[in-house]
Image (tube, helix red, strand yellow):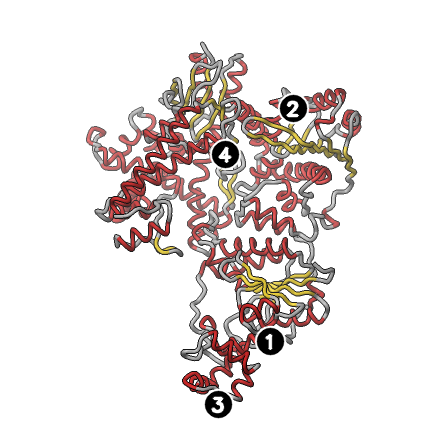
Amino acid sequence: MTDRPRLLLLDGHSLAYRAFYALPVENFTTTSGQPTNVVYGFANMLANVLRDERPTHAAVAFDVSRQTFRTEAYPEYKATRARSPREFGSQLPLLDRLLAAMSVPVVRAPGYEADDVIATLATAAEADGMDVLIVTGDRDVLQLVSDGVTVLYFYRTASEMIRYTPGAVRERYGLTPAQYPDFAALRGDPSDNLPSIPGIGEKTAARWVRDYGSLAALLKRAGEVRGKAGEKLRAAAGTVALNRRLTELVRDLDLPVEPAGLRRRPYDLAAFTSLLDELEFRNASLRQRLFAADPGGGRPPPDAEPDHVQGRELGPDELAPWLASHATGLTGLVADCTWVRGAGDIARIALAAGDGNAASFEPSVLTAEDERAFAAWLADPARPKALHDVKSLLRVLGERGRRLDGIATDTAMAAYLLLPGLAAYGIADLAGRHLGRRPAAEGAAGLMMSARAVLDLAGVFAADLASTGMDEVLRDVELPLSRLLARAERAGVHVDAGQLHELERYFSAGMERAADEAAEIAGRRFNPASTKQLQEVLFGELDLPRTKKIKSGYSTDVDALTWLATRTGNGLPQVLLRHRDQARLRSTVTGLIREIGADGRIHTDFQQTVAATGRLTSADPNLQVIPIRTEEGRRIRRAFTPGEGYAALMTADYGQLELRVMAHLSQDPTLLAAFESGEDLHTTMAARVFGVTPGGVTPDMRRKIKAMSYGLAYGLSAFGLSRQLGIPVAEARPLMDAYFERLGGVRDYLDHVVAEARATGHTRTILGRRRYLPHLNSDDRRRRETAERMALNAPVQGSAADIVKIAMLRVDAALTAAGLASRLLLQVHDEIVLEVAPGEADAVREIVRTGMTTAYPLAVGLEVAIGTGPDWNAAAH
């Protein structure tokens, strides 16, 4: 690496197309329906190149349109190229926004191609003494390679790259870069619709250019070329000459920028972070690499800098006086916490006071006086503290017997309430979005800047929470719940490791049996987990009906296999589904085994800021994916048992919670009466919809109404209902019409929810929790309809989440007030799981019933089913 300036030039369209076809669009789409595979692939490639090449200057060139001076000279130029897919074109404005936020100039020249822009800038930059790096997937740019110009050619995907220097061009083609356009003219280019010489391949074309020195010399002496090859050359001389003119890149365009003006500048952090969130880029590695490429190093612009920051690292006996002098008002606290399988640690803590002073220290170097002062400050409710991800700190402090009080806010949780559904709630992301600055990523100084950012964010969020009425949700629900969840995570849930290992072997054997059966049906062995091999067997050797077309052939996902199983008489798709199910169960069990701590318990991580509806989620491991409706799933639940000192597990599950919420919100008299009758809800509803007595309701009638009822709040369409029930759309549509004719209040409520959300931009739950849906007014029909389904879903599912959280808090508070040792361990959907101490079952059952049924005064009341047993499955009700 030299000290010379390094200019990075990227061919925007070329790289965008490679990203589009390298990443399946169905895997990169936001919840609103916006495709993002182009932006994701481009961003990933750009992050890697900026990291590896460290340019001082950069620009991206894009084509303006297909109409250029080349199409004027040769109308058939690129005429065979298909129009860009709609999913591709919709992402180009997003690419412009990404590059603008990263302060990377975009250069276009009407009437010319991106290659001509690159050629002009590269030529000028080299003349100015710069090293030039060109990133492209177009080989025509190889003509620009020189001692000062290197081409990074992405030849297959957006990650496989060849570095072309003059020597590399010679090694690959046996030619100099200056000779490359002559070779390309002879070879032709199908992608540009430039014709080749029939029967003349790359080797012959390269040999001719080497032997004669140039295309001009070759054509001048074309009569010397003997045989059929010479005849073909002479016949195509005019075509080859035209190819040569079209292949030559323009190096002297009049552009609005010069190389010196392309020096890299700091990001617009607010715009950059907001766009990553809008695109739902949750990949932490990509976000980190993109942030790391910021030439501003996370330094804020002058108007975004904190007024006064004085930070220092504290040594022994320095913490106590610092706390006494500075940490008297609201203080930002950030801790570098780790928690692995039930064991927690704090590497470093940083504090930022309102007077501008900041400090950091390692807990391991604290003296006894420091320890006492810090413990007292943490536990003092009169010393307000702003934290980020308070649950993590509560979890680790709790392990050490430390109390944390005076929690004024949690900036991660506050941001989540204000903007649910963001891709990330890290301090760096929020500081970039709301403060226009990004704290340094590592070290004591970075941690102190993070603490200051938390303090500043607390002020920003406080006003917004108050204005939206969600300050009470934070104060009365989410912050107390963080404390409860930290205790539940710390306690963990006991498992019988022997049972889990036995289940792992059992499911592995099930996979092997399914693989053997699949081999017998197919007539040969193959890997059921290989998409390529499945395609060969299903659609090649067995010639089964084709499923949805995907990039690699035809789909073999669960929906495709299910369709094949019902469409054909071949038994292989059903066997493959069984193999896939066994593999999923084995993966679940293996993940559980991996997470067992030294105490024999699994300590999951409950996440409060992931689901946009307000639902809790679970990770490391995800305990919400353990199935309950199948016997094999219930076998996994049997491995969850009470730990030492406890007698049983207790489960408590709300009955039809979301439907009760729907009845409350819609006030539909038919739905209210169905609940108030005390009869089976789905039977009662089926009787009314089908016009029969409850005794005349058949199992099929009940099944159809149950599917309809649970699909109400999810924007279930006639097509969706037909797929769910396995009936024609023509039968599903009148069934829906009849249902909504009987439940006019529900229909009117759902219409009102969407209309109000379209007017206000958000929905609200019973506690006032909001979900913002900007795409309700989108011109894109697919995105608008997706937003409408979210609008239908959010108030019901979010209100159900509110009720479960309130119930958890009430049950926990009552257990504590009663002085009981029993404790809440898990929350899964509408169910809570408790570990019951000997002799406390009756008291706990009454506390749970009271706490859950009185959590919120719904119009139809709340019902809960409670069970107790020696394991999670046996405790089912």
Disc 1 crowd, CA 10 A, few/some/many (<14, 14-19, 20+): some
Q: Quadrant of residue 640?
A: top left
Give x and y (percent) for residue 153.
55, 63
The structure residue drawn at horizontal position 51% and vertical position 14%, both measured from the top left corner, is 821
616 lies left or right of 110: left
Location of mark 1 (residue): 178
Q: Are marks 3 and 4 in contact (CB under 8 Å)?
A: no
The structure residue drawn at horizontal position 61% and vertical position 26%, both measured from the top left corner, is 396
Give the secondary structure at mark 3: helix
Marks 3 and 2, Cα distance to the nearest angstrom? 94 Å
Marks 4 and 2, Cα distance to the nearest angstrom? 27 Å
Q: Is residue 861 visible?
A: no
Q: Is residue 600 above or below residue 563?
A: above
Location of mark 3 (residue): 223
Choose mark 3 or mark 4, whichever is in front.
3
First reached walking from the N terminus: tag 3 or tag 1: 1
First reached walking from the N terminus: tag 3 or tag 4: 3
Marks 3 and 4, Cα distance to the nearest angstrom? 75 Å
Location of mark 4 (residue): 619
Location of mark 2 (residue): 405
The residue under label 3 is which amino acid type? Answer: Gly
Give the secondary structure at mark 2: loop
